[in-house]
Amino acid sequence: GSDFTIELPDAVLKGEASIVSDYAIDNFVAAFLLVEHVTQKRLDAKLWASIHPPLGRLDLIRHAHGPAVIVDYAHTPDALEKTLATMRTLCRGRLIVVFGCGGDRGAGDAALVRHRLCLSEPPHPDIMRI
């Protein structure tokens, strides 16, 4: 988790949330401010820790032995770059990255994979169209 502060005109709120990246904290603060504006109620900072990111966003898969595994469905080159930057700050030692794109992704995403990933299986049709 992350400890952070939200400074408002009428209060300074300090709390911890189950998020680890700068962009996730930015999203949390934006959602916090939107909810406060719409509901006219403030979420107690003690409750921040009970809020978890959506599945697929820097999910830690815990197991007793072996390296930590984190799953993130970064779906654009910018999102992948930000995710990797966050992982580098959290990683002690070697960082191994496995990424790809499947489904009906855009040509730009497929090009990113084609240029950065050695495929051990037949490429997705999106990659072949480029």
Image: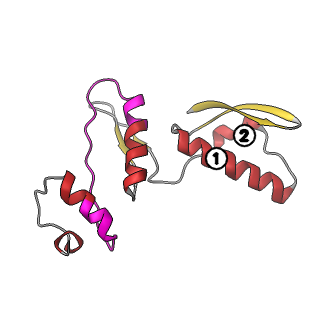
Please state which amino acid type lies under the numbered disc 2. Answer: Leu
At x 76% / y 55%, what residue is drawn? Answer: 35
* 98 vs 104: above or below: above
Picture layout, residue 75 above or below residue 9: below
Query: 39 left or right of 65?
Result: right
Residue 24 on image: x %, y %: 55, 45
Say whether disc 1 or disc 2 marks the residue closer to the N-terminus. 1
Q: Is residue 55 left or right of residue 108?
A: right
Q: Which quarter of the picture shows residue 91?
A: top left
Is the C-beta separation of discs 1 and 2 under 8 Å? Answer: no
- Residue visible at 11% across and 62% down in the picture: 121
* Mark 2, secondary structure of its residue: helix
Q: Residue drawn at (41%, 29%), measured in percent from left and top?
A: 89
Q: Quadrant of the N terminus?
A: top right
Q: Magenta residues?
A: 86-111
Name the residue furthest top: 92
Q: Name the residue under label 1.
A: 28
Badge 1 marks a residue whose secondary structure is helix
- Residue 90: image quadrant is top left
As for residue 104 lying within the magenta part, the answer is: yes
Real-space CA distance between mark 1 and mark 2, rounded to the nearest whole angstrom? 13 Å
Residue bearing mark 2: 47
Please identify the dominant SS of the magenta region. loop
- Residue 41 is left or right of residue 126, and the answer is right
Kindly identify which numbered label has been placed on residue 77.
none
Percent x, y of residue 105 = 33, 70
Q: Dot 1: few (<14), some (14–19), or many (≥20) neighbours within 10 Å?
A: some
